[in-house]
Amino acid sequence: MSKFLKWTKKMLTGLLIFVFVLTALTWIAGSIAKNRLAAQYPAPGKLVDVGGYRMHIHCIGEGSPTVVMEAGLNDFSLQWSAVQTEIGQFARVCVYDRAGFGWSDASPHPRTVAMMVNELHTLLQIAEVEAPYVMVGHSFGGILVREFTYQYPDEVSGMVLVDSAHEQHFVRIPAFATLTEAMASQFKLFATLNSFGIMALSPAQIPARGLEGEALEQYRALLATTDYFNAAVIESSSFLAEYGNGSTRKLKSLDDLPLIVLTRGLPDSLPILSEQENAQYDTTWHELQSELVGLSTNGKQIIAQNSGHYIQLDEPNLVIEAVRELIKNK
């Protein structure tokens, strides 16, 4: 019996050593892959110090007003890759990465909407991107550009909302709270895997999410080489904490600000809902979109008939033309 116990102990010890060595080798290989991949895709714009940490902003084109584009929840500048170059042909257009995403450093400050708006305003000032601005916001970014406009009304000349979230997003569609919590839990797992460089060893396995070409390669490289997933956990959890849990936040008027609301025409089914529940969700989403149009006496809505939630990737020309219309009317 004692021989068997000794043999078992020896086998377990050997197995633990094997696991340790394999983990160490994976971490070393992953670190090398991360460094190589990061070096291939430097920031296309400028890294601007906004108070001890840097944020990435990428501006092209000329003219005034300047178009400022705000990505959705856990997204960053690359989600505008299908529209920025075209808009840059007739206007000055800037995309940027919120702190912790893309090429931007993490922020030491809480990830509240007010703080994100403050960081964007600071970034624009230090980078010398002059007002007035046409603010373009997708999904969660729609809440951010509205808050930016409430804080700095004299600096905004127009707004495009791209299938924007609503201030009562979680209250009116409770399934979003459950989905956001599940997404945050999944990101925690991905963050652990990414700490060993596993994604950098095989970045092609990262889903494309509608991106193509160089933008897709950059996107995969950034997810594999940065602390993206931890940033996503924080941003998702912060959004839910601030706007969920029975929040009664009400919409604020945009007065007569020129406003174009682009709304998806295709269903965007949630996996945790039944077919009937998804139908009700879609109906509620369109009701919320109509309420957003009513924020301005100078607002109008366009239904993107062939688009899901990412209209800027499914039908980029709709976003481009909406921006062009607001620019031409200035």
Image (cartoon, grey):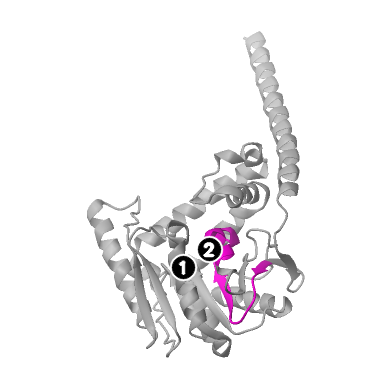
- The residue lying at 68 percent from left, 78 percent from top is 129
Question: Which residue of the protein is positioned furthest toward the left in this rendering?
Answer: 276
Number of callouts: 2
Marks 2 and 1, how far apart in space? 7 Å
Rendered-image quadrant of the N terminus: top right
- The residue lying at 44 percent from left, 59 percent from top is 310
**Residue 327 image point, x, y percent:** 52, 80
**Residue 47 image point, x, y percent:** 74, 65
216 sits left or right of 48 in the view: left
275 sits left or right of 288 in the view: left
Point out the tag, 2 or 1, that comes first from the N-terminus: 2
- The residue lying at 62 percent from left, 37 percent from top is 202
Q: Amino acid at mark 1?
A: Val
Q: Would you identify the image quadrant in which residue 54 lies?
A: bottom right
- The residue lying at 58 percent from left, 58 percent from top is 78
Marks 2 and 1 in Cβ contact (< 8 Å): yes
Secondary element under disc 2, as helix, strand or loop, is helix
**Residue 250 image point, x, y percent:** 39, 81
Q: Which residue is mark 2?
A: 83
Q: Would you identify the image quadrant in which residue 117 lies?
A: bottom right
Q: Amino acid at mark 2?
A: Val
The 10 Å Cα crowd at callout 1, few under 14, some 14 to 19, many 20 or more, is many
Say whether residue 10 is magenta: no
Q: Is residue 225 above or below residue 28?
A: below
Secondary element under disc 1, as helix, strand or loop, is helix
The image's mark for residue 319 is: 1
Residue nearest the observer in this picture, 31 or 65: 65
Residues in magenta, as a range: 57-86
